[in-house]
Image (cartoon, grey):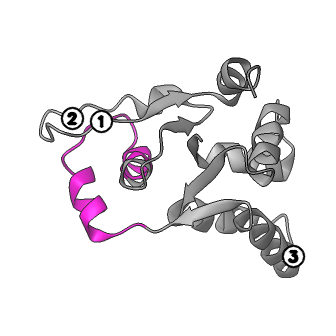
Amino acid sequence: MDRLFLDTNIILDIILERGNYQPCLEILQRGDDGKVELCTSFLTMANIAYILRKAFSNVEKVITLKQLSSIIKVLPMDGEQFDKSLFLDGPDIEDIFQAQCAVSAGCNCILTHNPKDFKITTSLLKDWRCPSVMTPEEYTAVFFVSL
């Protein structure tokens, strides 16, 4: 079974129904059905809570985040992940932290609308490998045909 790491923008698309959110919703449904395992980081959930503070009441925000966390496993982030992240290079330090969290949790794919932000180089960490990075549209086109 695939273990998918959801980037912040994927979860926000689902909550706010923005853009082409249908593939994101399909992935969430597959997670709810137990066909894929969905994960995200504590950092993502913290960022989402912060972003939703203006658009949602506190009660709506809590209900939304609890519903999501019943389907999406919220992964911890720790000092070891932080230290390893410092030896990686890429366009966005926050996405480096996210990728390291995904690697530590054994995720085999990162789903994002910004694959270019996960072009991470590993010159100082020889054994580090980023999981595959795909958009939701790419993932559903490749993998949902066979499910």
For this rendering, which residue is in front, 87 or 105?
105
Q: Nearer the viewer, mark 3 or mark 2?
A: 2
Residue 123: give x, y in percent of width and height. Answer: 14, 33
Mark 3: which secondary structure?
Answer: loop
Circles 1 and 3, Cβ within 8 Å, touching? The answer is: no
Disc 2 crowd, CA 10 A, few/some/many (<14, 14-19, 20+): some
Q: Given the image, on which type of amino acid does mark 2 rest?
A: Thr
Task: Tell me whether the residue at label 1 lies in contact with that at label 2, contact meaning CB atoms closer than 8 angstroms.
Answer: yes
Name the secondary structure under disc 1. loop
- Dividing the picture into quadrants, the one containing residue 4 is top right
Magenta span? 77-100
Which comes sooner in the sequence, label 3 or label 2?
3
Find residue 129 and name its label. 1
Tell me if label 3 and label 2 are in contact, CB under 8 Å: no
Relative to residue 46, is residue 143 drawn left or right?
Answer: right
Q: Amino acid at mark 3?
A: Ser
* CA separation in Å, label 1 and label 3: 40 Å
Q: Determine whether 62 is above or below 13 in the image.
A: below
Residue 57: mark: 3
Q: CA distance from mark 3 to mark 2?
A: 42 Å
Residue type, numbered disc 1: Arg
Tell me how far mark 1 sits from mark 2, CA to CA: 8 Å
Which of pointers 1 and 2 lies earlier in the amino acid sequence?
2
Residue 56: image x %, image y %? 85, 69
